[in-house]
Structure formats: C-alpha cells, structure tokens
Image: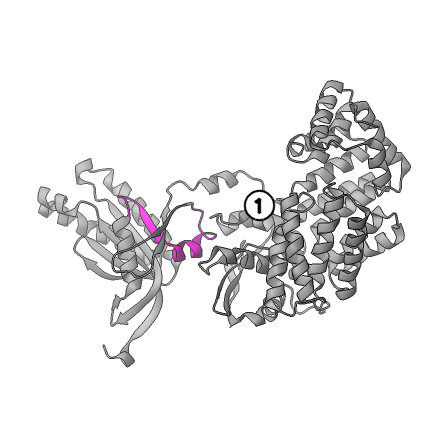
C-alpha cells in the first residue's frame, strides 16, 4: 500500500482459536468440520452481531473479530465462551470445542475489509498465552471496561510478546466476579433531591507509578471544585477512592453511593504534555451524557480542571452563578509538591514519619510560591497534628498552625477547607464567635464538605447540643458513605455526649481497634453502663498507646463551651480508671 493510501483506526480486536484443533481433526475430520461450521452459524455470528462486531476473517480453526467498543468486545467474548460451554455439554469431553481468546485495544491498518498491524498481532499473542476456555486482555482493554462490567481480573504482569517491541500488561478475565459478589449485598442509598454525583479515581495511563499521585490529585481537585456548587450533591473524596483499582459495574457503585451520576476518566502525563479523558455517566439510565478528551501542555492543567468542572455542572444543572475563582499555584512544580504532601496526610491519624515528610514537601512548596493558599493550609494541618498527636506538643507548633491557617484564608478567601480548619483551631482557642463565623463561611462556599460537617459535630457536641451533633455527623456520612475511621469516632463521641452509651459502644467497638481516642470514649461509655471490667480493660489498652494522657490535661485543652458536657466525659474517664 502506498503511504498516502494507508488508513488507520482504533479498534478492539478479538482473536479466538480452537484448542487442540489438530487432535480433533485427526480423530474425525468430517465431524469436527461439521461442528465448527454449526458453531459459527448458531453461536459465533449471532454473538458478534448482537454485540456490534464484525467478523474480519475466519482462519481455519480461528477467527478475527473487530469491535468499535472495548466493552462490547469483552462482553461478546464472555458470551461466546459461555455459549460454547453450553453447547459442549451434549458432547463427549474428547469432542468438546474449547476456545482460547485474546483481546487488545490498538491501532490497526485498514485494507479494504481486512485489518493488519500490531493491534492485531498483540491480540493474537494474547490468545496464544491463554489457557483453554480463558480470555486474556491487554491493559488497554482492562482500563476501558473495569468500571463498566461486573468483572474481576487477575493481573499477570507485563509480558514480552513475540515480534512486539514493547512489553504488554496482561490480565486474565476471571469467571467469578468476586469483587461484585462482595458488594452485591450492600444496601443502596436513596437518591437526593439535587443532582447527585461521584467522581471515581482517574486511571493513570502514564506507565509510571510516580504519576499515580498526579492522577489522584486531579480527581481530588475535581471533587473539590464540584462540591462548591450548591446545586449538586457531591460524594466526598474518601468514599470515591474506596473504588480505586476495583473492577465494578458503574451501576453497582452508584447504587452503593446513592448517586445518579458518575464521572470517570484517565490521565496520561509525558514529555510536558497531559492527556485527560473524562466522561459523565447516567448510572440509572445507562447513558453517557458527555465525554471529552483534553490534550494540553502541563502548564494548562488548571484551566483544564476548570473547564471540566464547568461542563459537568452545565450538563447537570445548567449555568449557575459563578463561584469565586480558586487560588491556583504559579507552577506545576509547586502543585506536584503540594499533591505529594497532602497524599501523605491521613486526616487526624497520620504517622509521625508521614507528617515529617509532608512538612518538608509543603515547606518547599510555600518557599517556591508564597501565595499558594492550599499549601499553607496543609502545612498548618501538619503543625496542628504534631501538637494534637503529642508528637511535638509545643505551644510553638499550635501557634504556627493558627498563623499558617490565617495566611491560607487571607490568600484564598474562597477556599472552604481553609475556613473550616481555622474555625476548628479557633474553637480550641475558645474564640467561639470567630469559630462559628468561619464554619458558616465554609458551608456557604462548599455545602457538600463532609469533613467540615464531621468536624463541626464535635464543636457542637461540646457546646451542649448533642442531638444537633448527631444530625451533623449523619449528614457527613451520607456525603461520605465509605468514610475515614475518624468519622465513627465523631459519631460515637456525639452519642456519648447525648448520654446514649449503648449506641456509643456499638459504634466504637470496631473503631477502637484502630484509634486510641476511640478506646478512651469506649472505656467511658462502658463505665457509664456499669461494665467496669470491660471499661478498665479498654482504658488500659488506651493508656498503652497514649501513656502521657491525664484527665486534667484533656479537660483543659478541649474546645468546650458547655461545662456539663465536659464533666460527663470526666466522670466516665474516672469510672474507667484513667489517671487524673
């Protein structure tokens, strides 16, 4: 073919081959050919047609099929294997027609009705690797279908294939979708009145593990941007990331999260460029409402984030009043440092080593860009945790946290997280009116901020309004159905403040395994119920993890407006045998 006549297209290629064809022909050539002809007419052709494919050619004991969709290609291959197995049931085992199948997503060269190229060759090599009755797929196929089909995959790693220059990541399709089974019995949540949406973790297609953090950062920023819109109900980050790396049907995910719409996408970063594919899915109706590819210079990543957010909002609720623009970093280097730093921070329970590393990265970020508000906010959080976790419980760290949080708000008054965080710190300073104002500002800016609701519940409980605190944390849990563990600590705390000790015990029993503060409140709850032996056992476990704890120090440090509430906790701690 002359170069100007070459036509190419992207296609999902299925190559299937009969296992032991020579043996079958040797046993009974006429019968084998008759069965193959019958299977092609009654199984292969109807399956391919039903899934929108095209039989490119039949090659003796094999077949090459083209699909325009990776989902259709794999769905068709699965149905083909299933129907072949059903047809084999009526034959002696020695006469079974068993297929091995390989599927690849790749570029193909078109010559009339025929296809050529590495896209075909890789599918053929995958078929050659597959066990009898199995389906092997390339990484490209797996990435395209992993949230659209209820399947699990066995990761076989990167393989060197004959006459293929680069290694290919190979997956085996599992016949038993274990991940789907694990989730099948989970109850769904009712849909909110507002358009409800979850952003699933973007897939890193860069081929470099170090860019996983970059893809995660894009996902987190998109969740934050969407959460600022009062017309949407947006699932929190922690619940969205519960599905990272899992191959589940999008309808199942939406059912568990109680949302109608899902956003999913991928990011490829290389040589100063970024390619982002995004799609908005109606998980109830099964429709793709919007999909687009963005290919830009890395320096344009922030404008791409804004554009994606605008298009999703427009698709779901139309044009609404514009939110204040976010404070963006001046360089990609600063953004990378901040994303890496925040990825090390597990809210309210980071390890000392992770906090130290985050401190280094975030200090580098603010030194490069002294006007990047988010980096200052996360750095404030680091110093607060060094104080709060008694890693370095100095007054200097506490004051430094407050100073940096103030700077973050000054640099970006439109960042809800900075407002709720400084509101939290001000509560510990017992500056109640200022604290209340900051939380109010946070909820005005970002009504969907689940973390702010959860944190606010603690402040409200300490103000003597336990019922309101329970309501707040329950609202947070609806926005974050797969929350970080500290949400349950807050829920148990609120129930204790409400004198609902049995409920507090029920909530804290599991959570106490992971968090020492939960053991403290669990011990107090058990003591209030008169279960002294259990209470003292939990208190001893708590003290083993937190040997410097004293009731008097705890009482003096709490953001407590209501003395009766504090006294209720002190009473429980004393009954449990915690030190004065």
As for residue 351 lying within the magenta part, the answer is: no
Q: Is residue 130 left or right of residue 398?
A: left
**553 relative position to 318: left or right:** right
Task: Please state the total of marks drawn on the protein image.
Answer: 1
- Front residue of 374 and 46: 374
Residue 122: x and y, percent? 29, 58
Q: Quadrant of residue 93?
A: top left
Residue visible at 31% across and 63% down?
119
149 within the magenta span: yes
- Segment colored magenta: 130-151
Q: Is residue 565 above or below residue 396?
A: above
Q: Disc 1 designates what residue?
A: 256
**Quarter of the image holding residue 160?**
bottom left
Regarding mark 1 in the picture, which secondary structure is present there?
Answer: helix
Q: Quadrant of the N terminus?
A: bottom left
Quick one: 408 or 62, which is closer to the camera?
408
Q: Tell me where residue 163 appears, x and y as whole percent.
A: 25, 60
Rendered location of residue 112, percent (x, y): 24, 72
Residue 179 left/right relative to 393: left
Name the residue at 54% across, 69% down.
Answer: 298
Can residue 192 be seen at all in this image of the molecule? yes
Give x and y (percent) for residue 173: 37, 47
Residue 447 in sight from this viewpoint: no
């Amino acid at each position: 073919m002359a170069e100007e006549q070459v036509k190419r297209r992207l296609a999902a290629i299925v190559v299937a081959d009969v296992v032991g064809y020579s043996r079958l022909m040797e046993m009974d050539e006429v019968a084998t050919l008759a069965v193959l002809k019958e299977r092609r007419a009654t199984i292969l052709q109807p399956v391919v047609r039903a899934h929108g494919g095209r039989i490119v050619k039949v090659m003796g004991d094999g077949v090459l099929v083209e699909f325009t969709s990776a989902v259709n290609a794999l769905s068709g291959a699965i149905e083909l294997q299933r129907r072949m197995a059903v047809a084999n049931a009526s034959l002696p085992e020695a006469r079974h027609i068993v297929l091995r199948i390989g599927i690849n997503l790749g570029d193909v060269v078109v010559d009339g009705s025929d296809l050529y190229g590495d896209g075909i060759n890789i599918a053929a090599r995958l078929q050659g690797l597959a066990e009898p009755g199995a389906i092997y797929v390339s990484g490209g196929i797996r990435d395209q279908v992993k949230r659209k089909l209820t399947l699990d995959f066995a990761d076989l790693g990167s393989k060197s294939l004959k006459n293929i220059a680069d290694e290919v990541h190979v997956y085996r399709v599992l016949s038993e979708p274990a991940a789907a089974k694990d989730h099948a019995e989970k109850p769904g949540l009712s849909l909110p009145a507002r358009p409800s949406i979850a952003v699933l973790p973007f897939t890193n297609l860069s081929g470099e593990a170090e860019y996983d953090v970059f893809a995660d950062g894009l996902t987190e920023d998109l969740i934050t941007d969407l959460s600022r819109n009062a017309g949407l109900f947006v699932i929190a980050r922690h619940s969205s990331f519960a599905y990272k790396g899992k191959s589940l049907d999008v309808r199942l995910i939406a059912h568990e999260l109680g949302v109608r719409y899902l956003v999913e996408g991928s990011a490829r970063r290389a040589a100063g460029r970024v390619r982002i594919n995004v799609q908005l899915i109606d998980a109830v109706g099964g429709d793709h409402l919007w999909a687009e590819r963005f290919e830009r210079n890395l320096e344009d990543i922030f404008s791409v984030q804004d554009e994606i957010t605008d298009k999703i909002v427009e698709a779901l609720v139309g044009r609404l009043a514009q939110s204040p623009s976010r404070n963006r970093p001046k360089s990609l280097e600063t953004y990378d440092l901040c994303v890496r730093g925040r990825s090390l921070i597990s809210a309210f329970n980071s390890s000392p080593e992770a906090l130290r590393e985050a401190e280094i990265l975030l200090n580098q970020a603010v030194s490069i860009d002294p006007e990047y508000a988010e980096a200052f906010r996360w750095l404030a959080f680091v110093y607060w945790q060094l104080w709060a976790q008694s890693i370095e419980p100095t007054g200097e760290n506490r004051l430094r946290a407050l100073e940096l949080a103030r700077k973050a708000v000054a640099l970006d008054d439109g960042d809800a997280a900075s407002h709720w965080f400084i509101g939290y710190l001000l509560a510990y300073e017992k500056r109640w009116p200022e604290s209340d104002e900051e939380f109010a500002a946070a909820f005005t800016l970002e009504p969907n901020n689940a973390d702010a609701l959860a944190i606010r519940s603690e402040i409200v409980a300490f103000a003597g309004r336990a019922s309101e605190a329970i309501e707040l944390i329950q609202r947070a849990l609806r926005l974050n159905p797969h929350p970080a563990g500290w949400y349950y600590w807050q829920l148990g705390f609120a129930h204790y403040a409400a004198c609902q000790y049995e409920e507090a015990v029920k909530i804290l029993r599991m959570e106490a395994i992971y968090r020492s503060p939960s053991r403290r409140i669990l011990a107090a709850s058990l003591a209030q119920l008169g279960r002294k032996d259990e209470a003292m056992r939990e208190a001893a476990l708590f003290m083993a993890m937190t040997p410097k704890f004293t009731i008097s120090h705890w009482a003096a440090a709490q953001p407590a407006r209501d003395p009766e509430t504090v006294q209720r906790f002190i009473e429980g701690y004393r009954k449990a045998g915690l030190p004065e």
